Amino acid sequence: MDTQTVSRLNKPNQLYSSVKGNIDAAAQFETYTLSRKTLNASMISNKEIQLAVPATTTKSQWAEINRAIEYGKSQGVKVTVTQVK
């Protein structure tokens, strides 16, 4: 996730909103079909979002990311964050 855009630097809560949207999508997943193969929620034992963020992510942005991680826990979605260069 690009945390270095002007809007995300000026409004770190945009990170929370973005990650929350992904968490909500994972938590509310019901069914998906591709090439006549169907995957439904009962076939999924764990829900996880993997997020990569730059090492230059600010403290206030990290606070929003950590808030999203806690929200994910409350929704049954694990959020794993990896810091990249």
Image (cartoon, rainbow, N blue to C red):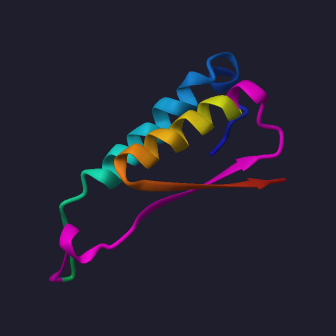
Vertical order, 81 against 41 (above or below): above
From the viewer's side, name the closer residue of 6 and 47: 47
Where is residue 66 shown, x and y percent of the image?
Answer: 61, 38
> Which span of residues is magenta-colored?
36-61
Q: Is residue 16 magenta?
A: no
Answer with the quarter of the image where residue 35 lies.
bottom left
Residue 52 horizontal side relative to residue 17, left or right: right
58 vs 29: above or below: above
x 45%, y 48%: residue:
73
At x 68%, y 36%, the residue is 3
Residue 38, given in percent of the width and then of the height, sits at: 17, 78
What x and y, as percent, mark residue 15? 57, 32
- 61 relative position to 31: left or right: right
Mark yes or no: residue 40 visible: no
Q: Residue at x 21, y 67 (%)?
A: 41
Residue that appears at 78% across and 55% down: 84
Q: How many marks?
A: 0
Question: Does the segment drawn in magenta span residue 57?
Answer: yes
Query: Which residue appears farthest toward the top when viewing the image?
Result: 10
Q: Is 33 left, or right, of 59 in this rendering?
A: left
Nearer to us in this view, 70 or 3: 70
Where, by quadrant of the figure, is residue 67 drawn?
A: top right
Can residue 4 be seen in this snapshot?
yes
In this view, the residue in front, 61 or 4, is 61
